[in-house]
Amino acid sequence: MADKVIVKDLRKSFGENEVLKSISTTVKEGEVLCIIGPSGSGKSTFLRCLNRLEEISGGQVIVDGYDITDPKVDINKVRENIGMVFQHFNLFPHKTVKQNITLAPVELKKMTKEEADVLAMQLLERVGLADKADAYPSQLSGGQKQRVAIARSLAMKPNIMLFDEPTSALDPEMVGEVLNVMKELAKDGMTMVVVTHEMGFAREVSDRVIFMDGGYIVEEGNPQELINHPKEKRTIDFLNQVL
Ligand code: ADP
Ligand code: MG
């Protein structure tokens, strides 16, 4: 499989505070990579460096063959192919579910309004919310909002999806419905990088898990290895707390 994301010696500082210290990894096409680690370890910053939501302080990030650290690269074009889903859904409150989904692809001239409408309904079907097309976000539960946020991302037809703790803000009974949508996406071959505390998801769905601490990749491996048989003390301590 082709390399979708190549990260070489990535460094990121905020002022004096170096929060990513020489991160290197490669994400293959169709791979599901989970990133775990304590709060403040740099997980979100790492994810945000992959679409240059954060300026990179050093090293290289290559996405789909584009070196996004190169100022000549049109970052907006690259970003169109990278979907991102956050902990908080950031839906537009005054637009319906369907309008939330069709907005970006139409504005960015990816498709006509009619095409976007058809796609929105397909995507809502896929996340189990076709009956909510005309509802407003305030009428939805947290889990439903997050599924709409995923559908909205997919409307841009990305080939990489980044998730930053997509279920952390949800009531426990809604976590499963969002993870199921993500599981289906993984099964369909989407390349995914997922920051999560859901060890069950990491174990079941991911191809590889990275444990980060203090801005470093402390340990990485397949989920069975890393979650069931961690080698590093810091990984063991962290897993003891979350499992
Ligand atoms: P995680 O997602 O693992 O909890 P973050 O990537 O959010 O960790 O944060 C890593 C470190 O970077 C933290 O010490 C945090 O305070 C710092 N940090 C994150 N974003 C900023 C910012 N915009 N400005 C300054 N410091 C930041
Ligand atoms: Mg975070």
Image (spheres, rainbow, N blue to C red):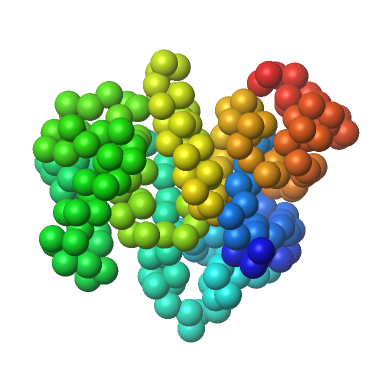
Figure check: 166 above or below 141 = below
Looking at the image, which residue is at 55% across and 75% down?
66
- Residue furthest bottom in the image: 72
**Residue 124 visible, this orientation:** yes
Measuring from the top left, give residue 12's x and y in whole percent. Answer: 62, 58
Question: From where the camera sits, is residue 149 visible?
Answer: no
Q: In this view, does 86 lie to the left or right of 18?
A: left
Could you tell whether 122 is left or right of 194 in the image? left
- The image shows residue 62, relative to residue 14, as above or below, that is below
Residue at screen point 19% across, 54% down:
118
Name the quadrant containing residue 76: bottom left
Residue in the foreground of this view, choosing between 40 and 200: 200
Q: In this view, does 106 lie above or below 121?
A: below
Q: Residue 231's x, y, as percent? A: 88, 33
Residue at x 73% of width, y 64% of height: 9
Decide: is 241 above or below 61.
above
Left-right relation of 88 to 22:
left
Q: Residue furthest top?
A: 173
* Residue 54 location (% of width, % of height): 50, 59
Placement of the C terminus among the 4 image quadrants: top right
229 left or right of 60 in image: right
Q: Return the x and y of residue 151 as percentages of the image width and height.
A: 32, 45
At x 13%, y 60%, the residue is 114
